[in-house]
Image (cartoon, rainbow, N blue to C red):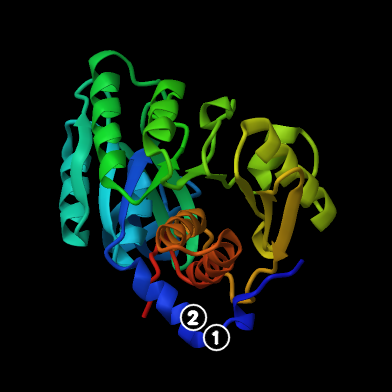
Amino acid sequence: MNNSLSESSHQEIRHLLDNMVGRRVAVIGDVMLDEHLLGQVRRISPEAPVPVLDIEHEKSTLGGAANVAACLAALGAEVQLCGVIGDDAASATIHERAEQSGINTTGLVADSTRPTTCKTRVVAGQQQVVRMDRETREPISGEVAERVIERARNAVLWSDAVILSDYAKGVLSEELCQTVIKAAQQRPVIVDPKALPWDRYRGATVVKPNRHEIQQYLRQDIDTDERAATAACRLADDLELNHALLTRGADGMTLATRQASSWETQHVRATRRELVDVTGAGDVTSAVLALSLAAGAQIGKAMCLSNLAAGVKVAKFGAATVSSG
C-alpha cells in the first residue's frame, strides 16, 4: 500500500501539527557537538600537495541526540535531553546551544574522564574536505551509568513520548534501554538504532533503522519493496515491537505494523527534492514521528509526515532542523 499525506486535507495536517506544540518528549542517547569550518580553496599549499582552505566562517551546532532535541524544539515541543558529556569547552557550548533552543539539559551527566563527542567538518564551498572526530566509544559504567539511568527514568515519567538516539558512543546500554522502555508503559518509544546487537530495544514501540543498518542486521540486501516489507516484519517480530519502520533514502520508507495474527505493511515514496546533505535526516524523522504519535496520530500518518519532513531536511546543508511553518 502506498500511503501519502497528499490524500489528506490541509486542515487535517494543520490540526496534527498544532497538536504537536507543547508535547513533552524525552530524548536519551549519544549527545554530540557538530563544528563546521567553512571557506574556499583557491590555492595549493607550497609545503605539501594539499589544498589551503581560507576560513570564512565557523559555527557549532547540536549533534547526535542533541540534534534530535533541537528538531523537536523547533517543532514546538518541550524537550528533556539525557546523556553524557565531558567537562570541557565543547560541553559548555552544548549547554549554551541547548539553552538557546529551549531544551532542558538537567538530564545531562558530566564525566570528566571522557571528552564530549565533537565532530569537526572542514568544508570548501559545499564540499566536505575532511571530518575530525574527538570522542570515546567506551560504554559508560559505574556511578555515571547509574546517574544517567536515574535521570532518564525521571525524564520518561515526565514525557508524552520517548526517543532513544543511538550513535554507538557507549551511552545506550541494555540496562538503560530496558529501564526506559519499561518505565514508558503506554508512552510511545521510538528507537533510532546503530550498533548491534539490537536486543536492548526489545519491547519498544518503533525501531527505525536505515537501509544500511537493516542490511547489517539481516546480512542481506534490501533492494525492493517486497524485501523491505519482509525485513520490517522480521525485525518487528524479533524484537517484539508494535512497529518497524525502515528508512530507505530515495526509495522512501517501509512500515510493518502488528495486527492480531499477522503484519500489515505500507510503503511511502520519498519526496523529490534537490539533494544537498543527508546529515541529520534520521534525526528529523525521529522527531516528527515521536511528536506525531504523542499528538495522537496513527502510525501510517506519522510515517507520511516524517517522510515529508525528511525531504525538507535533505534540501538543507548540515544537521538542520525543520519547522511546522
Q: Where's the C terminus, which quadrant?
A: bottom left
Quarter residue 18 falls in? bottom left
Q: Nearer the viewer, residue 85 or 9?
A: 9
Q: Position of residue 179 (x, y in %)?
A: 39, 27
Q: Amino acid at mark 2?
A: Glu
Quarter residue 101 falls in? bottom left
Q: Is residue 116 visible?
A: no
Quarter residue 158 falls in? top left
Element under label 2? helix
Q: Which residue is mark 2?
A: 12
Q: Which mark is residue 9?
A: 1
Label 1 with label 2: CB-CB less than 8 Å: yes
Q: Amino acid at mark 1?
A: Ser
Residue found farthest to the front: 260
Element under label 1? loop
Q: Position of residue 324 (x, y in %)?
A: 38, 75
Residue found farthest to the bottom: 10
- Residue drawn where x is 80% and y is 38% of the image: 220
